[in-house]
Image (cartoon, rainbow, N blue to C red):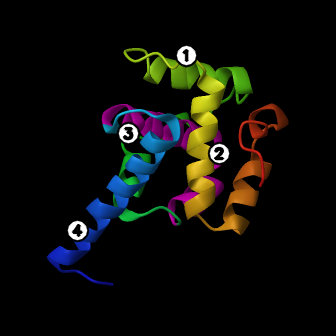
Amino acid sequence: MNTGISAFTQAANQAQQWVNELGDDLRWDDRRAYRLLRAVLHGVRDWLSHDEMTDLSAQLPLLIRGVYFDGWRPRHTPATDRSKESFVERIRRDMANDPLGDPDRAIAAVFRLLDRHLDEGELVQVRNAMKKALRQLWPAD
């Protein structure tokens, strides 16, 4: 593992790339795309079992992994109501200062971003751990 300053620069560049891609996909600015990425990652994190959640985290780039774990409260996860409606409402609440308009489209854009960058086998496990209604937002390609 590279422990020099270049590793930090690479991690920052990779995180910015993800945010830029999401912003481009949705035609949003970087700040809004970052807030959505964070909200959806937190929702996914809190919907999964601890084992699935940590397996997914191992696939994330360094800074994105930090965002994923930021504010995590293990005793409060996984969420008891793991319905699609509850998930979407969670994302809406997290984005309350910047309403989504079409939350399904926005959430699906984050899932497509993960599809492009993460291991397919891990993503299949994550999808299978979700209820069917929520999986519909994360269609397998």
Q: Which residue is mark 3?
A: 34
- Segment tinted magenta in the rendering: 31-58
Identify the residue at horizontal 39%, vertical 48% (top origin): 20
Mark 4 neighbour density, 10 Å: few (under 14) some (14–19) many (20 or more): some
Residue occupied by mark 2: 48
Element type at mark 1: loop
Specify the farthest residue to the bottom: 1
Which label sits in the foreground, 4 or 2? 4
Tell me which amino acid carries mark 1.
Gly
Work out how far the residue at label 1 is from the one at label 2, CA to CA, in angstroms: 26 Å
**Which sits earlier in the primary sequence, circle 4 or circle 2?**
4
Find residue 40 and report its horizontal and vertical position in percent.
Answer: 53, 37
- Which of the two discs, 3 and 1, labels the residue nearer the N terminus? 3
First of labels 3, 2 by sequence position: 3
Q: Earlier in the sequence, mark 4 or mark 3?
A: 4
Distance between the alpha carbons at the discs numbered 4 and 2: 29 Å
Q: Which residue is mark 1?
A: 101
> Which quarter of the image is occupied by the N terminus?
bottom left
Task: Tell which tag, 1 or 4, sits nearer the viewer.
Answer: 1
